[in-house]
Amino acid sequence: MKRRVDPTISVVLVFTVAVAVARAFVTRGLVGEAIFLIAPMLPLAALTVAAHRRDERDPTAWSILAAGMAFLFASELVWSWLELTDPDRFPSPGDYLNAIGIALIVFGLWRTAARLSPVGDRTGFVDATVLALGVGTLAWLFLVEPSAGKAHLGGSVELWTVLPLALDIAMLAMASRLAFALRVRPRAYVFIYLAVAGAMIVDVIDSILELGLRTEIGRFEDPIFIVSFGCWAAAALAAGPVARAQVSAMRYLSGRRATLLVGCLSVPLLALIVQELRGERPGSATLLVVALVELTIGGLVVLRIAGLIAAVRDLATAEGVERFAALVENASDVIVTVDPDLVITYASPSTATAWGLDPVALIGRRFTDVVAPEEAAIVASQLERAAALPPGSRLTLETRVRRRGGGHRICEAVMASLTDHEGVRGISVTLRDVTDQRALENELRTRAFNDELTGLANRALFMNRVEHGLSPRAERSDRIAILYLDLDDFKQVNDGLGHAAGDELLAAVGQRLKECVRPGDTVARLGGDEFAVLLEHGDGPVEAVSVAARIQEVLALPLPAGELHLGVRASIGIAVAQFGSTSHDLLRNAGIAMYEAKSSGGTRYTVFDPSMRAAAANRISLRSDLEKAIGLDQLHLVYQPIFDLKTRRVSGAEALLRWEHPIKGSISPVEFIPIAEQSGSITEIGEWVLERACLKAAEWARRGHRLSVSVNVSAVQLQDPIFSERVREVLELSRLSPQSLIVEITETAMMNDPEATADILAALRSIGIRVAVDDFGTGYCSLAYLKRFAVDSLKIDRAFVSEIGPKSKNLLAHSILRLADSLGVPSVAEGIEHQAQLENLALNGCAFGQGFLLARPMKEDDFDTFLALPDPSHRPKEVDA
């Protein structure tokens, strides 16, 4: 925040400038002299007021300055009178009074600087003297010495011409001394610096004129002199109490002070160089003066630096001792000293806060008494070893220190041999409490190698254990086996009960797995719902299969999952180490076997076989090729007619996806659909199938064939919340009536997420699309869910239809027919291959059917030809057994 200028000071400064301007234009006569005499009257009055101010700490200094200003005023009166009566008189009484006035001002500035400087500080005097000598040298070389050769003046005239300049240099020195004493510059002292600078400029100009042109009436430097008087007045008005500096300047040397000293030291030499360049040869007296000044300035600078070094050394010694004592007394680390007999001779106060022990009470006790008893012998041995080391050597030891009231703190002890130190004569022990640090390290280590949820080993630790078991140093690396577990349908737990319940279930599974193995075996959670078990020192595959069977049994028992208790099913892959196996090979093989078990229906275990690796590689290759199949036009649809079993006429067709691989030929959907579902490409493929089938059905409708088209939908597609919107877009694109589209969904897909599935099916049926349950009877959809889903038809799986013969009937198939009848929805039989199956189903109320007996799947062109027949009814043809 800026300080506001006193209005009185502002008035004085403005008035001073006005007087200076007036003097510049009126230089002669009574008016000019009267104007000039106003200038010293202002500072004389202001300095007198400052000398009598009550809050001023040293009125004597201001009194001296006021006296000096009074003499200056008197000198101006005399000069003004002589200007009118005897202008050529020089020196005059005015010159004598002026010299006395300047001398008093110098003394007043010295008194002020002495009061404000730190006690015993000589550096300000040294620096001010160096500055005065440097400026004086310049004045001698460029003013006194040149004029002495040009002007033929008497000795008295030359003396009184140069004397004011010398007094100005002394005044500059005292002002500099005052500036060096103050770390902060009050406004009053800034005005003093300006006043001194103005007076010095005037006297320099005056000396040039007097020495070069003898006396000169009407000096043009008067306006500057008037401004200088105004600054004295402003300084007096702005004066206030200033405290003595507390830190000696000897203790610091700023960049500006150092530059000043070096500059002044260089001035004489630089001035001589300048004179040489100008062609002016200095006389012998001048050279002697310059040499003396140079030696004097150099000696003062050396004195200054020596004083600085001494002060710094003393300060460092005194403050160092105080600082070290303060650091030891207030350090959080515990510092103790022990003698060669391991007896404590000093204990820092931090022992009270760190260990709860009284530091005074510790003196005289053996150091081994404060450490854990089981570590006392080790600590004593290390202390004796440290005492025998050369002075300054150190040993580091980590030990546990007993706390008052029980418990221990882990401390890192640094033992230093100080046997040659007079104040110690023993061993210094610095103990830092690292208990929290070690706890954090243990926690980080646990997090790095353990699963945070279950507390089991994580993948990194598990792989480390496997590598250790497979190392050549292991007893029997060929007896190592890995079980790779993946929980079946775990996603339903997270989606249905929430992730908190899922986490609880995973933690419980981890504990159950630990109960199924020996203490030396390792159970790990690899991530998500995947676990692994490392069996060491077992009997190879026999024991691994036994453990896998036991795990299946144990996990089937109810486990906590939120408010419920659920049994868990798992697919387990088993891999046994072979010669040359690596940890990655073993885990990969177990993973391949696990995926083989899962693809076979899950809830089982499978032992890895080398042929599985080829199958896994084939799946990866198929996955890569499948992602490019649509763009390469390798996928196509075939259509199998669906017949009305009463009229024996075509009522619709099921769109079936086929893949013609350019190298591997025709690939079954049973092989590539699961791969598409795992990779996520089933979404793109499913949209392509839906769009293609709807476009084809719309084409049939334009030709007069009002047939429905059935499209299979994956469970992955049902998880897409905008699936129903996508179906609506396809219907709008193809212009197919929604009633002509039947979406087929398996029981398993429906039950993955019943809530979401119900919403999607409701959205589809609101459009007018019909929903059929495909492969009904192979899943676990309950009657309640069937009613909730409000499906439009049930499709009997071919496995049940195949068991119907001429003299036998499948009770489950007939039960499905009765269930469909009770729900009021038609039934569709799949895989009809024999006449007896057709007749039995029709007789028991099956509404629709499809199969090789009625018609095989056809390509689009063949299906169009089939529809073009005059009577596209079925021509039954028995399928060879």
Image: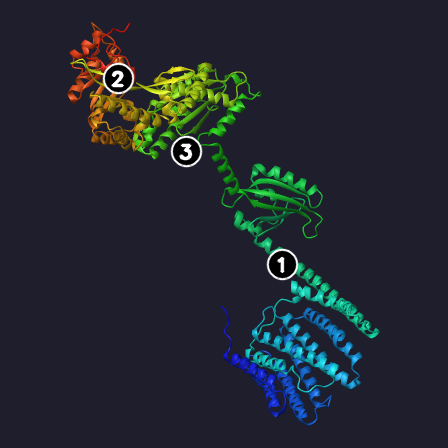
SS state under label 2: helix
Image quarter of residue 22: bottom right
Q: Residue furthest right?
A: 284
Does 875 sit above or below residue 512?
above
Callout 3–callout 2 Cβ contact below 8 Å: no
Q: How much space separates mark 1 and mark 3, taking CA atoms?
A: 54 Å
Q: Secondary structure at mark 1?
A: helix
Answer with left or right where residue 506 lies relative to residue 324. Answer: left
- Give the mark, 1 or 3, whose residue is nearer the N terminus: 1
Out of 79 and 451, give the one closest to the viewer. Answer: 79
> Which circle, 3 or 2, is nearer the viewer?
2
User: What's the distance in space between the residues labelled 2 and 1, CA to CA?
Assistant: 106 Å
Disc 3 is placed on an element classified as: loop
Read off the residue under disc 1: 322
| Distance (Cα) linking label 3 and label 2 | 60 Å
Q: Give the x, y percent position of residue 38.
A: 59, 87
Task: Determine whether 872 is above or below 5 in the image.
Answer: above
Circle 3 residue: 453
Q: Nearer the viewer, residue 579 or 301?
A: 301
Q: Nearer the viewer, mark 1 or mark 3?
A: 3
Query: Residue 84, how many percent across, how many down?
Result: 66, 93
Q: Residue type at mark 1?
A: Glu
Residue identifier under label 2? 864
Left or right placement of residue 618 versus residue 741 in this view: right
Q: Residue at x 44, y 24 (%)?
A: 532
Question: Front-most of 559 and 738?
Answer: 738
